[in-house]
Image (cartoon, rainbow, N blue to C red):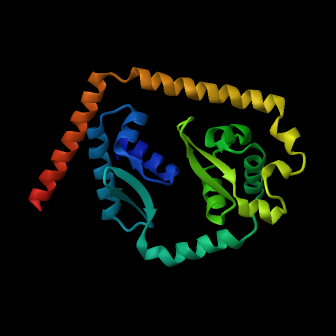
């Protein structure tokens, strides 16, 4: 397995959702064609062996998923996750989202100091939090659900105990605002760096990808 395939595999595992060829190319600093070739070889290697997980392609995106043969086992596990008690890390994450939400994943992880992908998935499955895309930040933000607030006997997050004190903590707010400004600046730099030449290059990559698909279809 090449280094590029290892990187793609790692990103697909931690993402827990489809990642487009373009996004992978941008993140790894390579051409879209290179991503497609490496991902297809990776996909084939997963198909070739008996594994509990596999990589699937949907349009121009790739995603890691559990093997259908183990669907009953996965369903049982998910049900236990939904009904079992929350772990301490899950409770900490839920509390931060309740008092600091809407909050982006990077801010949440900066507060906790660890990756929160699996915990967020669990809380989403349980219906305790919800996610939506913030057009201003161009990022996904998380907040607690109305059902969670109703369970606590309040109608809005502002009614939670010590909400104002915890929500407006000066040191934490300065830390998160600094991080948010850095995120916005990075986003603006990315937009400004886009040139007609770069766009033409990306289009060429997409055309090459389409041509390869056409060739595959003809061969079939």
**Where residue 91 appears, x then y in whole percent?**
77, 56
Asked if residue 2 shows in the view, the reply is no
Looking at the picture, does residue 195 appear above or below residue 69? Answer: above
Looking at the picture, does residue 178 appear above or below residue 47? Answer: above
Q: In the depicted view, which residue is nearer to us: 55 or 52?
A: 55
**Where residue 187 appears, x then y in whole percent?**
50, 28
> Residue most toward the bottom?
72
Q: In the depicted view, which residue is nearer to us: 131 or 120?
A: 131
Q: Residue at x 66, y 73 (%)?
A: 80
Q: Quadrant of residue 57?
A: bottom left
Asked if residue 220 shows in the view, the reply is yes
Looking at the picture, does residue 154 appear above or below residue 7? Answer: below
Q: Residue at x 60, y 70 (%)?
A: 78
Q: Quadrant of residue 65?
A: bottom left
The quarter of the rendered structure image containing the C terminus is bottom left
Q: Residue at x 69, y 58 (%)?
A: 145
Looking at the picture, does residue 147 appear above or below residue 199? Answer: below
**Where residue 71 appears, x then y in whole percent?**
48, 75
**Where residue 205 appears, x then y in whole percent?**
24, 36
Q: Is residue 73 left or right of residue 89?
A: left
Q: In the depicted view, which residue is nearer to us: 16 or 184?
A: 184
């Amino acid at each position: 397995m090449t280094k590029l395939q290892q990187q793609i595999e790692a990103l697909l595992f931690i993402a827990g959702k489809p990642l487009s060829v373009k996004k992978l190319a941008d993140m790894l600093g390579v051409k879209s064609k290179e991503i497609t070739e490496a991902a297809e070889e990776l996909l084939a290697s997963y198909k070739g062996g008996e594994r509990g997980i596999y990589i699937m392609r949907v349009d121009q995106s790739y995603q890691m998923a559990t093997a259908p043969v183990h669907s009953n086992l996965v369903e049982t596990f998910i049900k236990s996750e939904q009904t079992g008690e929350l772990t301490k890390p899950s409770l900490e994450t839920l509390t931060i989202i309740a008092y600091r939400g809407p909050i982006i994943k990077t801010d949440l992880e900066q507060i906790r100091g660890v990756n929160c992908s699996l915990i967020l998935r669990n809380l989403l499955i349980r219906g305790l939090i919800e996610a939506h895309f913030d057009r201003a930040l161009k990022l996904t933000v998380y907040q607690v659900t109305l059902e969670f607030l109703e369970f606590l006997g309040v109608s809005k997050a502002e009614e939670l105990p010590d909400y104002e004190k915890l929500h407006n903590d000066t040191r934490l707010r300065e830390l998160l605002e600094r991080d948010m400004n850095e995120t916005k600046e990075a986003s603006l730099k990315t937009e400004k760096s886009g040139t007609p030449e770069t766009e033409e290059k990306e289009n060429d990559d997409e055309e090459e990808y389409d041509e390869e698909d056409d060739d595959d279809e003809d061969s079939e």
